Image (spheres, rainbow, N blue to C red):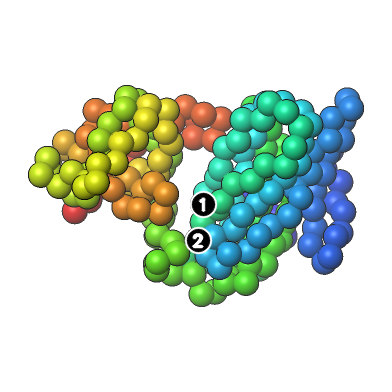
Amino acid sequence: MIKRLVMAALVMVLVIGGVSFGTADAGGSTTYIAGINDMGCILEAKFYTNLPGTYYVELWDDGMFYDYGQVDVTTAGIYSVNLVLPQPAQDTLYPGVGIYLMYMGDPFPVAEIDPYHPKNDSACGAGEDMVPIPSYAVGGQIVYDTDVYWGPAADQITDPLVTLEAGTTVWVYGPDETGAYYRIMFAGQMLWVPAGALSPNYDDVWQGTPLPSNIQS
């Protein structure tokens, strides 16, 4: 049931309560997926590690990348990220979804659950608990502290005012017709930011993927 299409030679599968948890233990370090909190169309993925560094938890479905969360680990402990399920889940090739824990620039997962069968596998759609993420959307990054807008116009600034800090990562959908603003998704909200405040995300997941040009309205 391969969703990511790459497998780690060092991954050992443990079966706990009917769910496959990948774990890696090398050089005195231990890393494993500690559990999944199924919140409908949002999955909270928890992992334990005692190895400092940057981790990415990726969500894949039928070979397609859908969402990820980044955690910068400094001390041993359990960490978590929220992942948004695709809408609807793509089960044309394999049932369920794949959840992969990646470390730094390593191309292979250090832990994984594949397949994971969400409770709402076939019922996820646009609603109050999730926002559609089109296939052309990519990860972007805010390059300077910027105010946020409900629409692509100066008079549509958020009230109360919302400001995104430099370094914040967001989903980017595309520019408005003028190219002055970009439509983004952040914390489950559809928002707009000035085009100059946004850049590609150069982390290990997106690696500077260009921002989409799909016109938004």
Label at residue 66: 1
Instruction: Name the foreground residue: 118 vs 63.
Output: 118
Q: Residue at x 71, y 61 (%)?
A: 115
Q: Position of residue 164 (x, y in %)?
A: 34, 35
Q: Mark 1: which secondary structure?
A: strand
Q: Is disc 2 in contact with disc 1, using a CB cutoff of under 8 Å?
A: yes
The residue located at (54%, 74%) in the rendering is 122
Residue in the image at 24% along x and 28% along y: 196
- In the image, which disc is placed on residue 163? none
Disc 2 marks which amino acid? Pro
Q: Residue 26: x percent and y percent?
A: 87, 30
> Sequence-wise, which precedes: disc 2 or disc 1?
1
Q: Is residue 97 above or below residue 57?
A: below
Is 53 situated above or below 87? above
Q: Does residue 67 appear left or right of residue 15 in this picture?
A: left
Quadrant holding the N terminus: bottom right
Which amino acid, by three-letter code, is at mark 1? Tyr
Residue 22 left/right relative to 214: right
Q: Which residue is mark 2?
A: 86
Q: Residue furthest bottom?
A: 123
Res 200 → quadrant: top left
Q: Locate residue 24, reporting x and y percent.
A: 83, 39
Looking at the rendered structure, the secondary structure element under dot 2 is loop
Camera sees residue 177: no
- Residue 207 left/right relative to 110: left
The answer to which of 141 and 145 lies nearer the viewer is 145
Label 2: few (<14), some (14–19) or many (≥20) C-alpha neighbours in 10 Å: many
The quarter of the displayed image where residue 73 is located: top right
Q: Position of residue 171 (x, y in %)?
A: 40, 44
Q: Is residue 95 visible?
A: yes
Please name the residue shown 47% across and 27% down the image.
Answer: 202
- Left or right: residue 73 versus residue 194 is right
